[in-house]
Amino acid sequence: MDLPDFSTLGVAAEGDQVLVVTLNRPAALNALNTRMGEELHRLWSKLGAVPDALRCVVLTGAGERAFCAGADLKERDGMTEQAWRAQHEVFERAFQAMMEFPLPLLAALNGHAFGGGLELALACDFIFAARGARFALPEAKLGIMPGGGGTQNLSRAVGARRAKELIFTGRPFSTEEGERWGLFNRVCEPGALRGDALAVASEIAANAPLSLRQAKLAIRRGAHLDLADAYRVEIEAYNRLVGTEDRREGVAAFNAKRKPHFRGR
């Protein structure tokens, strides 16, 4: 896949259908600066526009200490109100592109994730987290509030009452607490995190890519509808798959007792 060069992101293929994206500012604990926001927006927009090249993406961080420490407060120190708003618009575009990204997107939290760093993980479809890491949305301690989807995605993941407690207090929580609340799908040993995430990404990538996209679309659109309307969204998504080559290939492979060869068509 032809991707631009990035200064704050590492992008590496794992086989033909899985891509690992690494937040790559380890000296700054992978803090989110303006350049990273611009590059994340460019990356998600580019990947989402290529229908057949990928089937799953893993998002992680460089180093062993942090996935992402949040917005780079050194860059923000002394910013005018106008500059702050302009920077946040860059971040907003990146978060929105992530939340609308059509492919399965797995966060592998290799270390601490605070503020915008945790919001990046929350914008993914599901999360694996390394044991021993800490997490928080501490924006209220800085005179602001979550602005990268945190109030919405956290409450949808753990419930409104738990989200209010965490956002109002800004207190950190552990990997084990996050798993218990349903925020994290799996707690991994630090040395096993990448392998665990890639194993699941490869399992996902073996499935029909159009099926993955349509299922993700139905889940996202139906999540906030009543059951009857959500079911209509599901059926609409389902019917789009009936005429595909992949649907015919899947049935043929099942009956022939062989592995299917899906082409995204």
Image: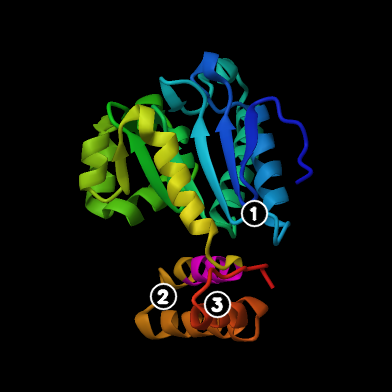
Q: Give coordinates of residue 37: x percent, y percent.
A: 63, 35
Region in magenta: 210-218
Residue 193 lies in what quarter of the image?
top left
Residue 53 lies in what quarter of the image?
bottom right
Tell me how far mark 2 sits from mark 3, CA to CA: 35 Å
Tell me how far mark 1 sits from mark 2, CA to CA: 29 Å
In the image, what residue type sits under mark 2? Leu
Pick the residue in front: 41 or 208. 208
Q: Which residue shows up at 72% across the image and 49% down it?
A: 46
Q: Give the residue number, with chain letter if any, for mark 2.
A: 225
Q: Give the residue number, with chain letter if any, for mark 1.
A: 54
Q: Which residue shows up at 63% across the image and 46% down it?
A: 93
- Decide if residue 150 is on the left or right side of residue 179: right
User: Callout 3 environment at 10 Å: few (<14), some (14 to 19), or many (20+)?
Assistant: some
> Disc 2 or 3, which lies upstream in sequence?
2
Q: Which residue shows up at 49% across the image and 79% down it?
A: 254
In the image, what residue type sits under mark 3? Ala
Pair 1/2: label in front: 1
Pair 2/3: label in front: 3
Residue 66 lies in what quarter of the image?
top left
Give the quadrant of the C terminus: bottom right
Pair 3/1: label in front: 3
Q: Which residue shows up at 59% across the image and 18% down it?
A: 75
> Disc 1 or 2, which lies upstream in sequence?
1
In the image, what residue type sits under mark 1? Leu
What is the secondary structure assignment of the residue under circle 2?
loop
What is the secondary structure assignment of the residue under circle 1?
loop
Q: Give the residue number, with chain letter if any, for mark 3.
A: 253
